[in-house]
Image (spheres, rainbow, N blue to C red):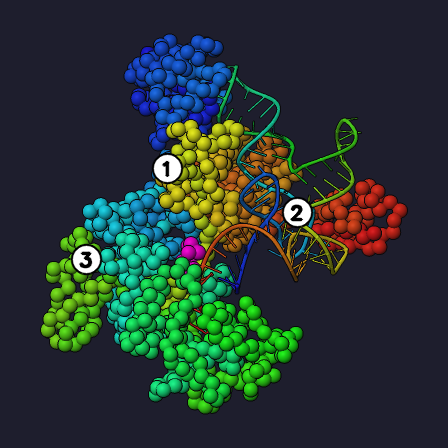
RNA sequence: GCGGGCGUGGCGGAAUUGGCAGACGCGCGGGACUUAAAAUCCCGUUCGCCUCGCGGCGAGUGUGGGUUCGAUUCCCACCGCCCGCACCA
């Protein structure tokens, strides 16, 4: 005899959700049909409580399930359940069998009050599911998402080809590094991009929306060292996992275009580009300083140096000179800077950051004569006007002259060596005091005969900027002042503040950097700063000892990395011919598979055979370049490769011409400088070498905010995952396992180290992709940081459930799809119809402007407005039909699966993903009447409703006729009545 | 230090860019349905005061000032928070 379980078939009241969730979960895991019955109920109640696949509708309990339930509940569980103590006893019984997950026990037994056991309940009909057929149709994301993803795949809905007859739109999100799992930042990023892609597709654009993998990089080598997995395997495994996760998000991607930068099919073309750049003089090799880890035998990036030590080895990092490959980004400095102005659809913030990074400054190079030597020192200054205030000269420790003297002077040599140790760490730079070493050399002051300035080697002077030497004017530069005070150097004020007195103006602890008149300065006296700069520069130039110059902070881009898991640099070092570029026919240079990671240093270097080759020029013995490219190189042109991902050349001309530039690029602001600047350079370099025909790769850029979550620490200071904590009703938070209090940290960016992360996979399992997507878009504006919250996700989930019911459980019959508009509307229907049209306009505008949170709000408003209708008046069944269809179309970019499902349920034709965007019926966008606020002296006193655009006099009269207004005016003189049409009336007393 | 941004209910955030502050949601309170719980639905929800009630009055967008008939929005000063850059000559 089978027993039927309805939607209310199994339930466990009493303790609230967690008891219910955990206990039941354990219980029902033991028997198939009972599990499904319970999960069914769980899913309906709270998606977080549900398992994965759920059987719907009515379930027949198997004999096995009944036996389990009998055991748990002590038999006789059929029919209605008695109340009271009996139930409590059974609950205790159930608890024994179910063994709640650890940590729940305390909560379970410590709560007072009545308690009811888990029990099956015979039921055939319920008020919630009026009939089995409707019960079958309730919102089940797991099922419908898989279904529609398969449908899009089957139809090739998102496959795209260049088609010059159609307008194109290229949407690109920054491609992910395959670290293993997608994280919430990815979910947000790709959701935003997908909304744009789907929206633009609906607007009739031919949309390119590809996905790939930034697949080279150090973590793969770390994994190889730590877990003995080959980097390639680790990377491709991660890609497979993450691809599957991304696919579950239902992104409208053309997966046929997928690329991975670690694949020879990609990096061989990168090698070709490099050879072209080399020929064009855009790549070169020179010695440069690097952060060298003497233990790991590797070069470290600045961010891998922590407090002057290698992040992995902990060894003190050295500054070492190494021969390195560079891209000549400085060939485009001025262009990269000035073109920022044309990037109108980039955030101001990013353009500013790039501008600061390029760091243009105007000034002059000046030569100073060294006393007792035949050579000169060249310095750079933006303030040649302060030359008469100069009291010393300072050289960088790496200045050739410093090094020369340092060789003969052990003290100076030691000082230089110390500077080299210090200068690698950013923090050290920040806190290091200004120190110098007097070389004993003197230079002549150019305009003060007989005056000599001491020459120091100073730790704060950078070799890479200007000429690596400065003159110090302590009175007008804080850093020089600090230095001068320390070494007892003269402080000569030469710029007089506007209100200063030339007789007794002096500089104390703060250098004066403001405007003023020059004094104490011979031929510059009386000039303002600006003209004095020009005059001093001219004087230097006239005497042949200087020139005006513009210098930039931006330096050439060093791309050599002493690593295995990167794109090999296609050159050979020949003893006879030197550095020889490979021929194109020799490409690709493939990475060897058989490498070992048991030794520190670059595995390519250790490889027994790989690097030994013959020189392509002379046929003699040669050695391959064992450095590989910086991974920023890989990501500097992937957007171009997506246009023709399988082409034999780096790009196919016709296709890049059609697709580029990227119309909308979306990613994190953390790439505002390097990645974006490198990509801009690369595009210019590819232009020069004939691969593309444009300079700017990204027409529009959007930088999204990060995903945050509060962090938790247990009493002993250990970080806890959000799922390890428990919020009690009184608001306090405890550690679930120990029931001890937990310290709650401020909300900050999700990071593994602080464990304040929520796994997207689990959220999608529980609520489905549409809920995750909707939540990502809902509350926070996309450029702002988003706080992840369980409540927010549940809100999104609840809305989708509500939407589902709005469509599936409509209380009245809808008109046929596409049926003509009724001749007459009731006012209820008309109001709703206006709302529909207003919503089309508003959502369209919001999506265009990336105001997705507002778009979601508009959609919900429409939903609420439609539910105001009860089908009782004329036109409502037609308006409801139209309203639901529009609603789904507007929601489709954001929550595509449920929209597709409900579209089909409404009998919509074809796939919603292929349906054009709705347009508004203009006649119904604006209301015929407007409500106008009436103020008296700026204070709101009431509102009037008048016909839109009606005459001012009528509005004024109506406003003054308001009793409340009359009362406020009461006898006083009206000085003025301001009427702003359709907006406001202000009666000024 | 330099550069940029942001401060609005208990919370996330709206506000057509100078025109009814608080859309939409979360939370909370109340109600309906239920033996019960969950879910769902309905009502309310800036604060204070007056009123049996309808309703009304006052305050209110970090603080203080200014411009304006009118300021969350523009200007000045200050406070707080966040981000980026930083010995750049």
* Discs 1, 3 touching: Cβ within 8 Å: no
Residue A465 drawn in magenta? no
Q: Nearer the viewer, residue A75 or A691?
A: A75
Q: Are marks 1 and 2 on the same chain?
A: yes
Q: Which residue is mark 1?
A: A762
Residue A649 visible at all: no
Q: Which residue is mark 2?
A: A927
Q: Are marks 1 and 3 on the same chain?
A: yes
Q: Nearer the viewer, residue A92 or A48?
A: A92
| Pointer 2 chain | A
Residue interval drawn in magenta: A664-673
Residue at 47% in and 38% down: A744
Query: What separation in Å lies between label 2 and label 3 (alpha carbons)?
Result: 72 Å
Query: What separation in Å lies between label 1 and label 2 (alpha carbons)?
Result: 45 Å
A816 vs A14: above or below: below
Q: Position of residue A268 (x, y in %)?
A: 23, 63
Residue at 55% in and 84% down: A521
Q: Which residue is mark 3?
A: A603
Residue at 40% in and 25% down: A104
Residue A112 visible at all: yes
Q: Are marks 2 and 3 on the same chain?
A: yes
């Amino acid at each position: 005899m089978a027993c039927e379980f309805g939607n209310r078939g199994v339930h466990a009241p009493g303790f609230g959700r967690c008891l219910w969730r955990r206990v039941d979960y354990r219980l029902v895991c033991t028997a198939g049909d009972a599990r499904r019955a319970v999960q069914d109920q769980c899913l309906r109640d709270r998606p977080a409580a549900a398992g994965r696949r759920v059987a719907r509708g009515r379930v027949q309990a198997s004999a096995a399930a009944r036996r389990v339930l009998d055991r748990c509940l002590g038999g006789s569980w059929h029919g209605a359940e008695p109340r009271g103590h009996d139930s409590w006893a059974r609950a205790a019984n159930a608890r024994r069998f179910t063994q709640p997950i650890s940590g729940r026990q305390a909560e379970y037994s410590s709560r007072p009050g009545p308690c009811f056991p888990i029990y099956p309940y015979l039921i055939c009909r319920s008020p919630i599911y009026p009939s089995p057929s409707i019960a079958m149709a309730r919102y089940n994301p797991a099922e419908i998402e898989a279904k529609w993803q398969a449908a899009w795949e089957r139809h090739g809905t998102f496959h795209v080809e260049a088609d010059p007859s159609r307008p194109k739109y290229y949407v690109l999100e920054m491609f992910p590094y395959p670290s293993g799992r997608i994280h919430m930042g990815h979910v947000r990023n790709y959701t935003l991009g997908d909304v744009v892609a789907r929206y633009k597709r609906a607007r009739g654009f031919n949309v390119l929306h590809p996905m790939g993998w930034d697949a080279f990089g150090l973590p793969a080598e770390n994994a190889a060292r730590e877990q003995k997995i080959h980097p390639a395997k680790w990377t491709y495994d991660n890609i497979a996992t993450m691809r599957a996760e991304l696919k579950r998000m239902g992104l409208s991607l053309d997966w046929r275009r997928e690329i991975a930068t670690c694949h020879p099919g990609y990096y061989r073309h990168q090698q070709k580009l490099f050879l072209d750049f080399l020929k064009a003089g855009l790549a070169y090799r020179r010695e440069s300083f690097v952060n060298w880890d003497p233990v790991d035998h590797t070069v470290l990036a600045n961010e891998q140096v922590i407090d002057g030590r290698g992040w992995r080895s902990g060894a003190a990092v050295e500054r070492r000179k190494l021969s390195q490959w560079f891209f000549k980004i400085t060939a485009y400095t001025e262009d990269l800077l000035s073109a920022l102005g044309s990037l109108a659809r980039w955030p101001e913030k990013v353009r500013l950051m790039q501008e600061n990074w390029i760091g243009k400054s105007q000034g002059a190079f000046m030569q100073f004569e060294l006393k007792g030597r035949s050579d000169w020192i060249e310095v750079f200054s933006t303030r040649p006007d302060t030359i008469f205030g100069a009291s010393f000269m300072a050289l960088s420790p790496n200045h050739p002259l410093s090094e020369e003297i340092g060789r003969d002077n052990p003290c100076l040599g030691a000082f230089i060596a110390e500077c080299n140790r210090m200068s690698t760490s950013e923090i050290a730079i920040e806190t290091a005091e200004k120190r110098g070493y007097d070389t004993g050399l003197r230079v002549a002051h150019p305009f003060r005969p007989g005056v000599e300035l001491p020459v120091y080697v100073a730790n704060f002077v950078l070799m890479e900027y200007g000429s690596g030497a400065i003159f110090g004017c302590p009175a007008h530069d804080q850093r020089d002042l600090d230095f001068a005070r320390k070494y007892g150097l003269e402080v000569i004020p030469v710029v007089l503040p506007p209100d200063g007195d030339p007789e007794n103006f002096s500089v104390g602890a703060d250098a004066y950097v403001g405007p003023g008149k020059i004094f104490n300065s011979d031929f510059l006296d009386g000039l303002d700063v600006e003209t004095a700069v020009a005059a001093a520069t001219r004087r230097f130039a006239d005497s042949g000892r200087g020139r005006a110059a513009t210098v930039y902070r931006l330096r050439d881009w060093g791309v050599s990395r002493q690593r295995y898991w990167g794109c090999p640099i296609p050159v050979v070092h020949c003893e006879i011919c030197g550095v020889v570029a490979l021929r194109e026919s020799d490409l690709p240079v493939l990475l060897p598979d058989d490498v070992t990671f048991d030794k520190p240093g670059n595995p390519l270097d250790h490889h027994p055979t790989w690097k030994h080759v013959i020189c392509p020029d002379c046929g003699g013995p040669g050695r391959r370049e064992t450095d590989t490219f910086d991974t920023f190189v890989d990501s500097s042109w992937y957007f171009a490769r997506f246009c023709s991902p399988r082409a034999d050349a780096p790009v196919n001309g016709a296709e890049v011409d059609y697709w580029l530039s990227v119309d909308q690029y979306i990613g994190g602001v953390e790439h505002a400088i390097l990645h974006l600047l490198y990509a801009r350079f690369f595009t210019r370099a590819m232009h020069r070498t004939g691969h593309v025909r444009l300079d700017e790769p990204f027409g529009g850029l959007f930088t999204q905010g990060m995903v945050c979550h509060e962090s938790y620490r247990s009493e002993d200071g250990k970080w806890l995952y959000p799922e390890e904590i428990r919020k009690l009703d009184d608001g306090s938070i405890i550690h679930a396992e120990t029931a001890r209090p937990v310290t709650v940290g401020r909300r900050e960016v999700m990071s593994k180290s602080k464990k304040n992360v929520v796994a997207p996979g689990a959220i999608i399992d529980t609520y489905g992709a549409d809920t995750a997507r909707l939540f990502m878009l809902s509350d926070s504006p996309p450029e702002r940081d988003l706080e992840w919250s369980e409540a927010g996700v549940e809100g999104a989930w609840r809305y989708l459930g509500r939407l589902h019911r709005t469509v599936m459980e409509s209380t009245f019959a809808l008109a046929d799809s596409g049926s003509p508009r009724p001749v007459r509307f009731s006012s209820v229907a008309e109001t709703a119809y206006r709302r529909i049209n207003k919503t089309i306009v508003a959502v369209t505008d919001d999506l265009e402007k990336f105001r997705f949170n507002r778009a979601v709000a508009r959609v919900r408003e429409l939903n609420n407005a439609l539910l105001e209708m009860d089908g009782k008046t004329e036109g409502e069944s037609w308006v409801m039909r139209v309203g639901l269809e529009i609603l789904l179309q507007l929601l489709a970019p954001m929550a595509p699966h449920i929209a597709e499902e409900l579209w089909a349920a409404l009998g919509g034709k074809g796939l919603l993903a292929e349906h054009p965007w709705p347009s508004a019926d203009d006649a119904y966008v604006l209301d015929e009447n407007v409500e106008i606020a009436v103020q008296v002296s700026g204070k709101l006193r009431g509102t009037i409703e008048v016909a839109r655009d009606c005459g001012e006099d009528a509005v004024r009269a109506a406003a003054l006729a308001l009793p409340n207004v009359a009362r406020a005016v009461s006898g006083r003189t009206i000085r003025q009545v301001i009427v702003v049409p359709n907006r406001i009336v202000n009666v000024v007393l």
